[in-house]
Image (tube, coloured by chain):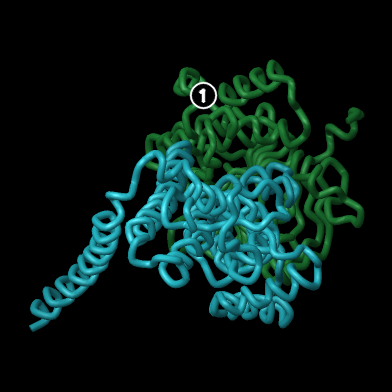
Chain colours: A green, B cyan
Amino acid sequence: MDKTESDLDLPQVRTQNLDLYYGADRVLRSLNFDIPRGCVAAFIGPSGCGKSSYLRCLNRMNDFISGARVEGRVLIDGEDIYASGVDVIALRRRVGMVFQKPNPFPMSIYENVAYGPRLFGVKDRETLDETVRSSLEGAALWNEVKDKLNTPGTGLSGGQQQRLCIARAIATEPEVLLMDEPTSALDPLSTSRIEELIRDLKSRFTVAIVTHNMQQAARISDYTAFFLLGELVEYGTTSQIFTVPVDKRTEDYITGRFG
Amino acid sequence: MRKFFDKAATLVFWGTALALGALLAGVLGFVANRGWSAISWEFIFEPPRDGMTAGGIWTPFVGTLELIVVSMAATVPVGVGTGLYFSEYATDSFFTHVLRQSIRALAGVPSVVFGLFGLSLFVIFLGFGSSMLSASLTLACLSLPLMVTASEQAFRAVPQDYRDASYALGATKWQTIRKVVLPSAASTIITGVILSIGRVAGETAPIIFTGAAFYTPDVAQSLFDEVMALPYHVYVLSTAGTNIEATRPLQYGAILVLVGLVLGISSIGVWMRTRLTREK
């Protein structure tokens, strides 16, 4: 895709007057904010505040929930992903996702990473080998698994499995990487490895991450959005949100008065 | 008191499991004991001779294998396809509710009714005649409910996480089913196939009217030949043979081979299943 200079200056993900309904429930209320290219945006807030639902709007995974309905617009690279005629399959290729629980397929490590490229018709062995290697390197897993690529991905430790899922997600070379509490099922050591990885990844991808852990948001993100009851209470640079929050509710939440 | 009930419950369940095991061992022991003397190479590889009072069971043995293969060739694709429909495509509607209930009801229909159904549909209406094809299709109908239920369960047991991961990578529904759901469900589906084979191999009633031969000297060469089958052969020898007492060893021998065949197929299935599971 050709990108002009001005395209690159635009925020990569623009959310405009976004409402999400599950049946009659209004889960997200008039969200408006932009995520700039090549940065990490963290979404924080108490359980049920809508941050995960929002994340799933960005690759239209909410389409699978019956009764889910979206109003407003989400622009990724200037294209409204909810416009009629949008190819959802192509969208999901541009917007990768890593889930809360590590969910490698019951296949070999190699096949897990090659899954995405194979979907799009890559058959050439050398190309696949190269993609698998570079993706595993990108996910800081290559050195640990290079000698056992044909062993099951499910045989790895939890932290390794999650890095395998990251490798699998970046193997399709997305532009945006969504992460839904990617470390909540992991031990502290694995968590810090993944956090390190996320900081590296933003040079290549725009990362949107949902986290329950405020320290994590503070450590790894450039921008932070605070959600409450389906509303975006406050959005700004992470340092601003954590040091001089404008809204009283943000301050209460990050200082641990509720949540 | 609570402790007593706990102990008693353990004992009762342990006892029932033991009783089941003992029952199986008893049946196997009885059959093996009576039939063992009849088993020899000739017994398996020679057709019945002298008005079926001598010779072996080659013709019904091969006939049963043929019936298994042809009926599975019909029932597995249809059963797995229907299971896939129920698990992945069907929405909760009145129509699918009725479909589900019908399949459940079908599982409870006596096998002789399937036999009569096969007679009227395959033998007469479709004109396949009394043949291996009619008998196999009747057996396929009989094992279909089992196959459908087993594969639906297998597909439902595939974690949603796998599907989510696949969709999130840009897979279509069919790609997700073919590359993730089907392989993950394969081992459970194989269990369903084994159960179906066990059912099909042992049935007599559905094939009596549809394609089982009282006696043929040759192994069935085409789908439109009649076949001898082990269970029907045993039934014939023990009820309508020319010399029932004299053929007792043949009867038990044939049963032993039938049991061995089913157990053999089951163990191949179990082996395949563990291999598939291990690959994960």
Q: Residue at x 74, y 68 (%)?
A: B122
* As drawn, A202 above or below B45: above
Q: Residue at x 28, y 49 (%)?
A: B37
Residue B72, horizontal then vertical, whole percent:
61, 54
Residue B87, horizontal then vertical, whole percent:
63, 63
On the picture, is B62 further left or further right than A33?
A: left
Q: Nearer the viewer, residue B47 or B174?
A: B47
Q: Which residue is mark 1?
A: A149
Q: Nearer the viewer, residue B112 or A223?
A: B112
Label 1 environment density (alpha carbons within 10 Å; few <14, some 14–19, many ≥20): some
Residue A90: tell me if it is visible.
Answer: yes
As shown in the figure, which amino acid type bears the numbered disc 1?
Answer: Leu
* As drawn, A108 above or below B173: above
On the picture, is B3 further left or further right than B186?
A: left
Residue A78, horizontal then vertical, whole percent:
87, 44
Q: Residue at x 85, y 48 (%)?
A: A87
Dot 1: chain letter: A
Q: Quadrant of the rendered structure where residue B234 is?
A: bottom left
Does dot 1 land on a helix, a strand or a loop? loop
Residue B157: tell me if it is visible.
Answer: no
Q: Residue furthest top?
A: A126
* As drawn, B8 above or below B173: below
On the picture, is A151 further left or further right than B223?
A: left
Q: Residue at x 71, y 32 (%)?
A: A118
Residue B177, horizontal then vertical, whole percent:
67, 50
How many numbered marks, from 0 up? 1
- Image quarter of the N terminus of chain B: bottom left
Q: Nearer the viewer, residue A110 or A144?
A: A110
